[in-house]
Amino acid sequence: MSEQNNKISLKLQKRLAADILGCGKHRVAFVQNQDAHIAGCKSRTAIRQIISSKLIYRKQENSVSRSRVRIHTAAKRLGRHSGAGKRNGCRDARTPSKRIWIHRMRSQRKMLRKYRDENKLSATEYHTMYYEVKGNMFRNKRVLLETIINLREEAKRQAAVQVRAQEAKTVAEARTTAAKQAKGKIAGK
């Protein structure tokens, strides 16, 4: 009984602090063993000074823990909790095939634009491949990229073949002119 009488009442300080901190009285907390110092502050300015010196502070709000949600989402990432019993709506209602088609078209066309802008595709190649994309020739971006790479390699091979053919042609022409000159010299003797 004597302990209750000796305890200092901080009702006023708690009410003022709650008003200053902009929260309820139950969220106002005092630092332990500083009751006598806090009890001496009976004005708002004094309470503000004590709040700035961290003797009075606002407790964190109690909220619902998200730990169970985190565990559940981590399990869902591993493929749990997504069986037939967890599904409402047919497959096409959950992820419409048209939406999948739109995503595929947009990503593949974006890739084509990127390669055209980087001059890895000519305008004609871009045009033909654009309509091949629209005609569902490529299952995904990887297949499209492989086709573009093959196209580039084929162009390089063609260029190399043309260079070799040109070199062979110049060598053959040089040989024929040399042979003609040699014949002309022999006939002239």
Image: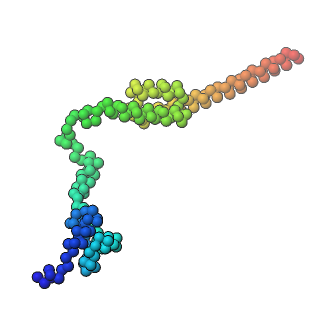
**Front in this rendered view, residue 81 or 21:** 21
What residue occupies the far bottom of the structure in this picture? Answer: 2
Relative placement, left or right, of 47 versus 128 is left
What quarter of the picture does the N terminus occupy?
Answer: bottom left
At x 54%, y 29%, the residue is 122
- Residue 31, visible in the rendered structure: no
Query: x%, y% of residue 101?
Result: 35, 31
Query: x%, y% of residue 66?
Result: 24, 56
What quarter of the picture does the C terminus occupy?
Answer: top right
Relative placement, left or right, of 146 versus 40 is right
- Residue 49, visible in the rendered structure: yes
Query: x%, y% of residue 46?
Result: 31, 73
**Front in this rendered view, residue 105 or 143:** 105
Relative placement, left or right, of 124 versus 131 is right
Relative placement, left or right, of 7 versus 171 is left
Answer above or below: position of 108 versus 186.
Answer: below
**Front in this rendered view, residue 84 or 60:** 60
**Front in this rendered view, residue 37 or 122:** 37
Q: Quadrant of residue 40?
A: bottom left
At x 52%, y 32%, the residue is 116
Query: x%, y% of residue 64?
Result: 22, 57
Q: How many numbered callouts?
A: 0
At x 19%, y 38%, the residue is 88
At x 30%, y 31%, the residue is 97
Instruction: Indicate how the structure is coloured in the image.
Output: rainbow
What residue occupies the far right of the structure in this picture? Answer: 189
Q: Quadrant of residue 85?
A: top left
What residue occupies the far top of the structure in this picture? Answer: 187
